[in-house]
Amino acid sequence: MHPGDFIITPSWMWHDHGNPSADEGGEPVVWLDGLDIPLIASLDAGFAENYPEATQPVTRPEGDSFARFGHNMVPVRHRVSDPTSPIFSYTYECSREALDALHRNGELDEWDGVKLRYVNPATGGWPMPTIATFMQYLPAGFNGRTYRSTDATVYCVVEGKGAVRIGDNEFLFEPHDVFVAPSWAPVQLSAAAESVLFSYSDRPVLAALNLLREEFA
């Protein structure tokens, strides 16, 4: 886990957390968990089960999932049985490189700057069936136009500083800040310095139920 990485915890999978550097005198780590618990709770489908031992065994080396699925290739006999992406960690290094390349080539949306969505490489769909994830780049001086959408979106600032107007309120942001754009609230982004924002929303669910609507001013 490194700053800016997007890491998936799939449903029906054991998972635990650790910080080896802390055992060696390193610094504590803080990350943002994006959860679909409110939706799952409304469906009465949430539960937890503890692994019978203190930690689960590691069966594959670090980087294995990206080697198998992260280069526009998949193992020849791979069969899709789970809608969750088989990539465990989408590294920030790769995401940032893609955003930078597109910006250098002149791509700049009036609302989003340069914005990409993460995909499940085995299906082309969302990385998770209930959560959409995005990374976007705003160059210094960017002053975006206003938009709104029925998906509620949580933003986390990876780099830079700027401001976001949500409805009638404006908030300044800097690295590690988190802010939320509720469903159908007008959103307008601006950047005082080049900025990168990670975000996630319930878009896959709304799209599947034909409840997704967007408006661009």
Image: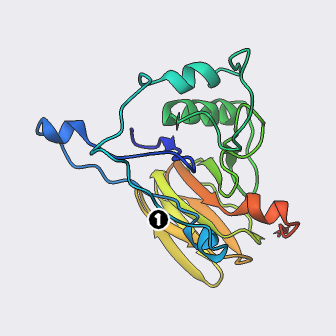
Q: Categorize mark 1 by other alpha carbons within 10 Å: few (<14), some (14-19), many (20+).
A: some
Which residue is at 68% across, 47% downward?
115
* On screen, residue 18 above or below 63: below
Which residue is at 42% across, 60% downward?
174
* On screen, residue 216 above or below 107: below
The N terminus, quarter of image = top left
Residue situated in front as seen by the camera: 98 or 100: 98
* Residue at the extreme left of the image, as rendered: 25
Image quadrant where residue 104 sits:
top right
Which residue is at 63% across, 51% downward?
133
* Residue at the extreme top of the image, as rendered: 76
* Residue at the extreme bottom of the image, as rendered: 168
* Residue at the extreme front of the image, as rendered: 52
In the image, residue 27 lies at what x, y percent? 19, 45
Image quadrant where residue 191 sits:
bottom right
Amino acid type, callout 1: Val
Residue situated in front as seen by the camera: 152 or 57: 57
Residue holding disc 1:
178
In the image, residue 176 lies at what x, y percent? 40, 57
* On screen, residue 106 above or below 171: above
Count of numbered circles on the image: 1
In the image, residue 187 lies at what x, y percent? 67, 71
Image quadrant where residue 213 sits:
bottom right
In the image, residue 6 lies at what x, y percent? 52, 43
The C terminus, quarter of image = bottom right
Secondary structure type for disc 1: strand
